[in-house]
């Protein structure tokens, strides 16, 4: 190889950078779940037909809601529309915990590394009855207790101008919807992540303030990322070609 050819080859090699593995992201379709309170529990008996499946492609979504009964009077939540209750319609109270778990069950390419997952919550919302208090306003808090992801937001709710009347618990018009868009979660190692939330009243001194809830909803999606296997680089190919050329010259 003459001097000009050597210089040309060197300039080409120096202009090509090594290609490292890049992160690939697999995202689930959006999930959307609704829960009403009936028969002493939060459940999906009224909402399953208008909620997304628990399995979407290679993702499994598992919402879990716990909480106790507040009153045997409450609204209903058919097809995720808060509606006047009658008969044995019930309502929940603010001692519940709301957990959203997401898992990627599909395969990643052989040799892929650093698999991590996060559950992204676009919205959490719940209907709360207007408080029966004298100062005209009260506050509630959406909060997250996921390890490494502590956050919260306080919401103000105006009161019902009328007197305290438990019969109003069945009146859908007496409720306000409180929705929160929490910050995106940090990624967890592996193919699963769970996030834990809670909704509480802040006026413990006045038991007529809140405690009556119904119509809980989760919406969001799940992302799983991994570092792809680096592809052979042009530098490596050129290096191999140069070595072969050198061997041929030695012959």
Image: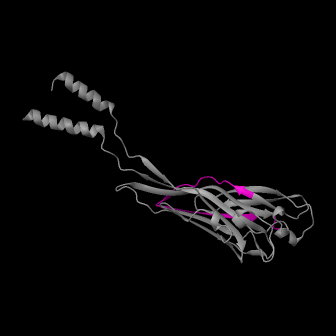
106 in magenta = no
Q: Quadrant of residue 115 in the image?
A: bottom left
Q: Position of residue 22 (x, y in %)?
A: 41, 46
Can you name the residue that lies furthest to the left here? 251
Quarter the N terminus occupies:
top left
Q: Is residue 149 visible?
A: no
The structure residue drawn at horizontal position 30% and vertical position 31%, both measured from the top left corner, is: 14
Please tell me which residue lies in front, 237 or 37.
37
Left or right of 163, for residue 221? left
* Image quarter of the C terminus: top left
Which of the pair 123/203 is nearer the observer?
A: 123
Above or below, 40 relative to 215 = below
**Residue 187: x percent and y percent?**
52, 55
Q: Residue 54: percent from the left, percent from the top?
A: 55, 65
Which quadrant would residue 9 be assigned to in this image? top left
User: How many numbered markers are drawn?
Assistant: 0
For the question of whether residue 74 can be seen, the reply is yes
Q: Nearer the viewer, residue 195 or 52?
A: 52
The residue at 34%/36% (across/down) is 17
Say whether residue 61 is left or right of residue 125.
Answer: left
Relative to 45, say whether 154 is above or below. Answer: above
Q: Relative to 10, does residue 189 appear above or below in the rendering?
A: below
Say which residue appears at 63% left-offset and 58% top-offset: 219
Report the magenta residues as a range.
178-204
The residue located at (20%, 37%) in the rendering is: 241
Residue 35: where, in percent of width, then height? 68, 67
Q: How is the image coloured?
A: one colour
Residue 185 is covered by the magenta coloring:
yes
């Amino acid at each position: 190889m003459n001097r000009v050819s050597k210089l040309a080859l060197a300039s080409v090699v120096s202009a090509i950078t090594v290609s490292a593995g890049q992160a690939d992201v697999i995202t689930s379709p959006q999930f959307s779940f609704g829960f009403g309170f009936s028969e002493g529990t939060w459940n999906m008996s009224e909402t399953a037909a208008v909620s997304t499946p628990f399995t979407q492609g290679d993702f499994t979504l598992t919402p879990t809601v716990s909480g106790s009964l507040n009153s045997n009077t409450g609204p209903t939540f058919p097809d995720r529309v808060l509606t006047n209750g009658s008969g044995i319609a019930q309502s929940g109270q603010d001692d519940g915990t709301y957990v959203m778990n997401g898992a990627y069950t599909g395969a990643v390419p052989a040799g892929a590394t650093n698999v991590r997952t996060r559950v992204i919550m676009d919205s959490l919302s719940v209907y709360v009855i207007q408080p029966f208090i004298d100062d005209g306003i009260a506050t509630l808090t959406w909060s997250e207790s996921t390890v490494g992801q502590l956050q919260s937001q306080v919401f103000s709710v105006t009161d019902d101008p009328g007197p305290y009347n438990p019969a109003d618990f069945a009146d859908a018009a007496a409720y306000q919807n409180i929705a929160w868009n929490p910050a995106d979660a940090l990624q967890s190692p592996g193919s699963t992540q769970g996030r834990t939330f809670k909704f509480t009243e802040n006026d413990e001194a006045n038991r007529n303030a809140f405690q009556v809830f119904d119509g809980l909803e989760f919406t969001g999606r799940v992302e799983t990322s991994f570092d792809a296997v680096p592809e052979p680089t042009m530098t490596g190919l050129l290096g191999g070609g140069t070595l072969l050329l050198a061997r041929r010259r030695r012959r």
